[in-house]
Image: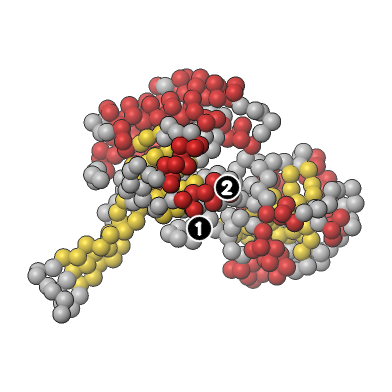
Amino acid sequence: MKLLNTETKNKVLQSMMSILDSRKAEIIAANKKDLDLFDKEDRAMYDRLIVDEKKVDGMIASIQEVMVQEDPVGKIKSNKALENGLKIENKTAPFGTIMIIYESRPDVTIEAAVLAFKANNKILLKGGKEAIHSNLVLESCWHQALEENNLDNSWIRLMHMNRQETQEFLRNPTEKLDLIVPRGGERLIAFVKEHAKCAVLVSGRGNNFLYVAKDADWAQSLEVILNAKTDKISACNALDKILVDVNIDDYPAKLKELQSILEDKGVSVLVDNKVAKVLTNCPVIEDDAIWYEEFLAMKCVVGAAEDLNDAVQKINTYSGGHSATIMTRNNELALEFMDQVDSAAVYHNASTRFTDGGQMGVGAELAISTDKLHHRGPLGLEQLVTNKYYVFGEGQVRV
């Protein structure tokens, strides 16, 4: 694959920003077709599908953000001179071709492509059928930007395949794939991991937890809980499970206040057997499988924790490995929690909603990786490269 210089890549991105701005009405009109065909009862998916003027402006801003970032390709990671005279450089290099499979969100068609392209990768975009009209226009915008700069459309392509064709492509790809990023449900992720012939980097489920320790600032805890749960229910960084330490002062009163505040905001509350002794009017969990579930809805579980170790054990057993928070005034306890919890992002006295490339200073993101190789957390520009060794010699042979 041809390496493009930074100037060429940035010219494409500059063109793309102008094209999105000039075709804004067309993009919104295409999105309306998708919205009109969609079942609005699935509120989380519907929210992800919406493209309005603000959303297009956000797409333009994400491209601008990536354009001004340093080119991640060709950066020297290490430089060594060996005793035998060999000089060895380890430099960053593109993956090659990245395929991303995602649902509903047309803005991913912009954010994933801009990151992959700036990192000198070709990208195959497999969006969901519910966003087909939006994605077709956005692909057309990308192709216009590439053509204006004398580049082939193959750099950024929408996969025009149904579900069965996509599955067959994964089983028997008709072109070389170097990395696949599935962003969807566990069935999709399991299928991709089973059948892919290349590396798979999982953007896993949320199912995020928050633990209120016995010495937590209760007013602050309520504020963080409400933000994490209700700010954007369709986000993978939204809160689903709340564990309250049974040793907190006025435990019954605090549970009742938590229930009241959540329900006032329209959040339905499920409880475990211990909390049910206090919140007697809440439905009780009947199947432990609910602890594994990512809700993407105005719904949460409130459970009891005997202490920090009990909370950590529950989180590591049931969570999606995405984000987890502890609310406590004790910095040592917070650090113990953060060290022990096995999640991509761990928080002390802050909302899980910050697990986001832009909020964490990474910029636009391809996904939030819950894998541990090669990267964990927001996949930004710097994470969309691999490495290559450059070895310079003068006729050395190994003896």
The amino acid type, in three-letter code, at marker 2 is: Arg
Q: Is residue 172 left or right of residue 49?
A: left
Disc 1 crowd, CA 10 A, few/some/many (<14, 14-19, 20+): some
The amino acid type, in three-letter code, at marker 1 is: Asp
Disc 2 crowd, CA 10 A, few/some/many (<14, 14-19, 20+): few
Q: Nearer the viewer, residue 313 or 61?
A: 313
Q: Is residue 4 left or right of residue 327?
A: left
Specify the label residue 371 is tagged with: 1
Q: Nearer the viewer, mark 2 or mark 1?
A: 2
- What x and y, as percent, mark residue 131? 52, 30
- Is residue 325 positioned above or below 39 on the image? below
Residue 268 shows in this picture? yes
| Residue depicted at 39% across the width and 39% down the height | 124
- What x and y, as percent, mark residue 316? 64, 63
- Badge 2 is on which residue? 187
Q: Nearer the viewer, residue 99 or 70?
A: 99
Q: Which element carries disc 1, helix, strand or loop?
A: loop
Q: Which element carries disc 2, helix, strand or loop?
A: helix
Q: Nearer the viewer, residue 194 or 300?
A: 194
Res 16 quadrant in image: top left
Colour option used:
secondary structure
| Residue depicted at 39% across the width and 45% down the height | 172
- Is residue 230 positioned above or below 345 on the image? above
- Is residue 139 positioned above or below 238 on the image? above
- What x and y, as percent, mark residue 125? 42, 38
The quadrant of the picture occupied by the C terminus is bottom left
